[in-house]
């Protein structure tokens, strides 16, 4: 189940070693570690709340969680580091005024500092969106009645996700009767519905 | 052979397409809301020295592109989820799908408008400011249409948390629009060198 974790961590460590400056390298390595721990915990949680077919997808979900957590943490951490250096006036990207600095150089330095902040914010937003999408997908999959197991689904069909007949809510509620055979609308039979997809996946 | 069967079981089932389709729909709503709020409040003096106007404009542009990416994922997962047949063309052609034609058509119209807004923004130099500004007004049309699409055909639209999220986004956009309307139009001018 956790086989997706090792390659993802290896990949992140590879990026950390090869392509980024020293500060971000440490941040990225730490973020990958935290993301791995989180994915381990999620693994236990997801096994408890999701239907069996999700186990096959756990490596992918874990990889997504590790990636998004890494993005969030590295974005936020490098942002924090940039702010810290900014305040201390240590960085060349500091927005604090320097002595004997021409106005043009000052504008360029401030714009550079802002661009750095925007880049870090962008990384944090992308990571947060990826994490929220994965989390929400697992959440809606685990909480909607009828999608947690084949038997629940068949019991709740029509109320949640039935393209033919029955039910006043959910997908296909308006496709009852003859209109279910309208062109372009497939009407899954009892042997080819999503219930079989679930049991096949497990 | 065992690897083949493992790959087969690891392939996303239709249910996962459905889950990700719903998740991306809701995330797209939040991202579009944030994009619109930044766009609406942009001409107001919400910028500071640490976050000047060009930074806010950049974040607005990044959020718009990211929301378009999420919407594309939403469309692809919806098409791949073969529970009902929804052709890819239905993403851009209203009434291209026989499944819930009205609600799907609203989604297609909202997507077309967003596509036009983003294309004219990316090619602003070629199209000119007037076309860009005129197209940008369609944001006020496309966002409510997208919300109606979500409320009408969203699998979670009747759930309390989804309703709170949707109406929370509506309230935020309404507040931003109200603030924009209340404020005087601001004409940017450079401070006079002498004073």
Image (tube, helix red, strand yellow):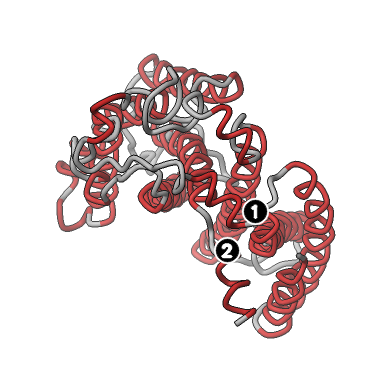
Pinpoint residue B54: horizontal percent, then vertical percent. 44, 49
Dot 2: chain letter:
A
Q: Earlier in the sequence, mark 2 or mark 1?
A: 1
Q: Same chain, marks 2 and 1?
A: yes
How far apart are the two marked residues, 2 and 1, measured between alpha carbons? 53 Å
Q: Nearer the viewer, residue B13 or B90?
A: B13
Judged left or right of residue A60, residue A89 is right
Identify whether B147 is placed above or below A192.
Answer: above
At mark 2, the secondary structure is helix
**Of discs 2 and 1, which sits in the foreground?**
1
What residue is disc 1 on?
A: A53
Q: How many residues crowd around disc 1 within 10 Å: few (fewer than 14), some, or many (20 or more)?
A: many
**Residue at the spot 51% in from the left edge and 32% down from the top edge:** B46
**Could one spot residue A82 in this view of the protein?**
no
At mark 1, the secondary structure is helix
- Quarter of the rendering containing residue A8: bottom right
**Residue at the spot 65% in from the left edge and 39% down from the top edge:** A148
Q: Nearer the viewer, residue A195 or B136?
A: A195
Identify whether B144 is placed above or below A50.
Answer: above
Judged left or right of residue A1, residue B128 is left
What residue is disc 2 on?
A: A109
**Could one spot residue A30 in this view of the protein?**
yes
- Quarter of the rendering containing residue A166: top left
Judged left or right of residue A173, residue B122 is left
Pinpoint residue A76: horizontal percent, then vertical percent. 71, 54
Asked whether the beta carbons under mark 2 and mark 1 sit within 8 Å of each other, the answer is no
Q: Nearer the viewer, residue B94 or A49?
A: A49
Judged left or right of residue B195, residue B188 is left
Looking at the rendered image, the quarter that the N terminus of chain A falls into is bottom right
Pinpoint residue B38: horizontal percent, then vertical percent. 45, 36
**Residue at the spot 64% in from the left edge and 59% down from the top edge:** A57
Q: Give the residue furthest to the front.
A: A191
């Amino acid at each position: 189940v956790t086989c997706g974790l090792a390659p993802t961590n290896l990949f992140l460590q590879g990026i950390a070693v090869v392509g980024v400056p020293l500060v971000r390298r440490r941040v990225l390595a730490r973020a990958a570690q935290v993301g791995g721990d989180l994915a381990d915990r999620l693994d236990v949680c997801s096994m408890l709340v999701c239907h069996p077919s999700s186990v096959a997808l756990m490596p992918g979900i874990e990889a997504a969680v590790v990636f998004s957590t890494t993005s969030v943490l590295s974005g936020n951490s490098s942002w924090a580091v940039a702010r810290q250096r900014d305040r201390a006036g240590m960085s060349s990207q500091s927005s604090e005024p320097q002595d004997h600095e021409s106005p043009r150089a000052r504008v360029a330095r401030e714009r550079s500092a802002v661009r750095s902040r925007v880049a870090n914010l962008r990384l944090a937003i992308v990571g947060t969106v990826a994490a929220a999408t994965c989390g929400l997908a697992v959440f809606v999959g685990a909480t909607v009645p009828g999608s947690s197991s084949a038997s629940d689904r068949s019991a709740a069909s029509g109320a949640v996700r039935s393209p033919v007949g029955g039910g006043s809510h959910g997908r296909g509620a308006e496709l009852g009767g003859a209109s279910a055979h309208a062109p372009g609308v497939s009407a899954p039979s009892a042997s080819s519905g999503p219930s079989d997809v679930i049991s096949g996946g497990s | 052979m065992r690897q083949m069967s493992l790959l087969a079981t690891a392939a996303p089932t239709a249910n996962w397409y459905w889950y990700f389709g719903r998740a991306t729909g809701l995330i797209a709503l939040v991202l579009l809301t944030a994009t619109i709020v930044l766009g609406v409040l942009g001409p107001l003096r919400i910028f500071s020295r640490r976050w000047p106007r060009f930074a806010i404009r950049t974040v607005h542009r990044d959020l718009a592109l990211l929301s378009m990416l999420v919407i594309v994922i939403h469309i692809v997962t919806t098409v791949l989820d073969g529970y009902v047949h929804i052709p890819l063309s239905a993403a851009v052609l209203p009434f291209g799908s026989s499944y819930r034609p009205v609600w799907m058509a609203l989604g297609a119209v909202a997507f077309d408008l967003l596509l036009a807004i983003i294309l004219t923004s990316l090619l602003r130099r070629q199209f000119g400011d007037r076309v860009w500004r005129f197209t940008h007004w369609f944001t006020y049309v496309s966002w409510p249409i997208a919300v109606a699409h979500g409320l009408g055909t969203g699998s979670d639209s009747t759930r309390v948390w989804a309703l709170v999220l949707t109406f929370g986004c509506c309230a935020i956009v309404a507040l931003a629009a109200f603030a924009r309307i209340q404020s005087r139009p601001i004409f940017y001018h450079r401070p006079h060198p002498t004073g």
